[in-house]
Image (cartoon, rainbow, N blue to C red):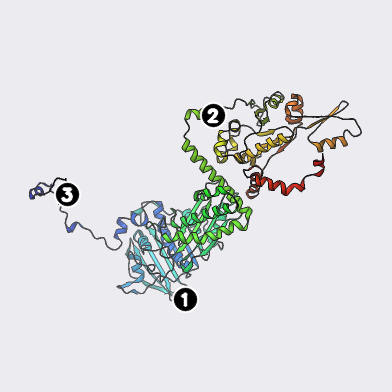
Amino acid sequence: MNLPGTAAYSCTMSDDLFDKLPAGDGDYDASAIEVLEGLEPVRRRPGMYIGGTDERAYHHLAAEVLDNSMDEAVAGHASRIEVILDEGNRLTIIDNGRGMPIDEHPKFPGKSTLEVILTTLHSGGKFSGKAYATSGGLHGVGVSVVNALSVSTRVEVARNKEVFAQEFSQGVPLGPIARIGAAPNRRGTSVSFIPDPEIFGDRSFKPARLFRLARSKAYLYAGVEIRWKCAPSLATEDVPQEAVFQFPGGLADHLREQVADRECVTSDFFAGKQDFPDEQGRVEWAVAWPLWSDGATSWYCNTVPTPDGGTHEQGLRAALAKGIRAFGELTGQKKAKDISADDIVTGSEIMLSVFIREPQFQSQTKDRLTSPEAARLVENAVRDHFDHFLTDNMERGRALLGSVMERMDERLRRKAEREVKRKTATNAKKLRLPGKLTDCSGEGNGETELFIVEGDSAGGSAKQARDRKTQAILPIRGKILNVASATADKIRANSEIADLGLALGCGTRKDCDPDQLRYDRVIIMTDADVDGAHIATLLMTFFFQEMAELVKREHLFLAQPPLYRLVAGKESRYARDDAHRAELEATVFKGRKVEVSRFKGLGEMNPQELRETTMNPATRRLTRITLPAEHEKRFAVKELVDQLMGRNPEHRFNFIQNRAGEVDRDLIDA
């Protein structure tokens, strides 16, 4: 068929072309096609079944056998599992479940069902869901793969008050199943095996890794007791010879141990469990938000670790993100709509365990869950609980929201910086110290101080009054930017804040590192009047928002310059405020004629007066600025800062109106 406007082309292949093809060294015919039977495929290509032959794959053998026992426990048929590591690299896992069937299998006459399970791929009781509602094993290859890759395997089954046993090597039975005795008080399955050195080389089981595996399984199902035992020669300081694991609190117990004494955003973990509707399974979770932590996540499906997460992870992330955004809207935080799942998950400690029917995984090693319905089930189950967690304790909810919004701001700031891509030369220029800074020589044996001084006039007096070895002076011009109501771009563009950041050298926000601070103390020194108090408040707001770690480490102070000088005869005293003046007049100067002079500002003091009253460590008074130890109480401080210094004037109006009655009437009359 020719298309309009195109030429016709034809392709022919002549017989003599075949004559010109090169002859192979061997014939490729039916005899070249191999058919691998039984467990041969496993030994030829172990990577297809356990992900390789490295240490991780080696220990995956233990997980496959332990998962079978856990499936019995989760199904309600086993209450105890024993994990025993002996010398010679032999691992034995015993449960008190129903025991593998040992009667003849209907499809394999002359073979016991136990032998079929151990020697045939895709054989098991987890395909139809009749024997197990939920299970970690799905494909019927787990224990048969272990058998194929072991130089020695022994299985004992206690059923019907009798014990049966069968042994294998490299997947091949060494004899038929045999009755070895009566067992009136015993039931369950014991699988004992030694991995094959032909497959794995000189590898051996790591006791610490098996110990952690056994303990983690006990956390995943609160109703099971797991007993650990190893040969005395294998025990270490971290791995006892014997231990018993049983955790009624489940994942919450595990997370509490994992977080230990680290400070968290919320004092209570977000933990719970919920059944899915229509008997589709259940979910259990535990989440904590440690401060200054990289965080860690643990995901499980039917007690099987899924280190790469998957759809159950997506469901939890969606529940947390939607819940915190809704809480932000409830509390009037409009910016909360920009919160992403990463903002609330990054840095957190998360444990999530789901039990679902017929889960789908990315591979036989089950590293990632791909069941699409898991996302919906987990999100719906967790979301209601998270909403209650936030609203039942509003202080806790606001603390978490504040922490998440700080991470959001940091993410958006970094994104903006990447988009701007400032030139290297420009950045290099900004590394020099600000010109207004009069630095100290730094010879003060770890007692250096930076005085942030209001105005050039006060700065001139402070430079003359200072101890040059230990005291640096940085004058600022008037009232600095209110960072609580300014955008990130405006803060970065402000020259006063830029100078202050360069002088301190410790970074801001998430990058604030008090260990890099160039001074031991940072002292805010402003006039003892209303304007001075306002400037000090703006500076404290800056430190609270941009350098909270510096405040927490107690590096920030307020100088206490005097407001009055009182003189009677040859005696003079300084008063910090009206109350202190009245106290001096009623005590030191009682009955005497006192000459009172009021300092309009620091610049009016001569250097000698400024040194004596405000800068000399021996005679001055400083107020240390701190934060509460508990993060939730620190968030209450943040709320107060937002009310008084934030963008919304209604908050300030309400604050003043609600507290007007607390103002001293005598002060108003004065």
Q: Which residue is mark 1?
A: 184
Q: CA distance from mark 3 to mark 1?
A: 85 Å
Q: CA distance from mark 1 to mark 2?
A: 83 Å
Q: Relative to the observer, which residue lies in front, 385 or 130?
A: 385
Count of numbered circles on the image: 3
Could you tell whether 583 is left or right of 494 in the image? right
| Residue 159 in sight in this render | yes
Residue with the most extreme right position: 591
| Residue at 63% across, 34% down | 480
* Of marks 1 and 2, the one in the foreground: 2
Task: Give the number of the disc on residue 430.
Answer: 2
* Of marks 2 and 3, the one in the foreground: 3
Q: Relative to the observer, which residue lies in front, 383 or 505?
A: 383
Could you tell whether 123 is left or right of 228 in the image? left
Task: Give the number of the disc on residue 3.
Answer: 3
- Amino acid type, mark 3: Leu
Q: Is residue 132 above or below residue 335?
A: below
Q: CA distance from mark 2 to mark 3?
A: 69 Å
Element marked by disc 1: loop
- Amino acid type, mark 1: Pro
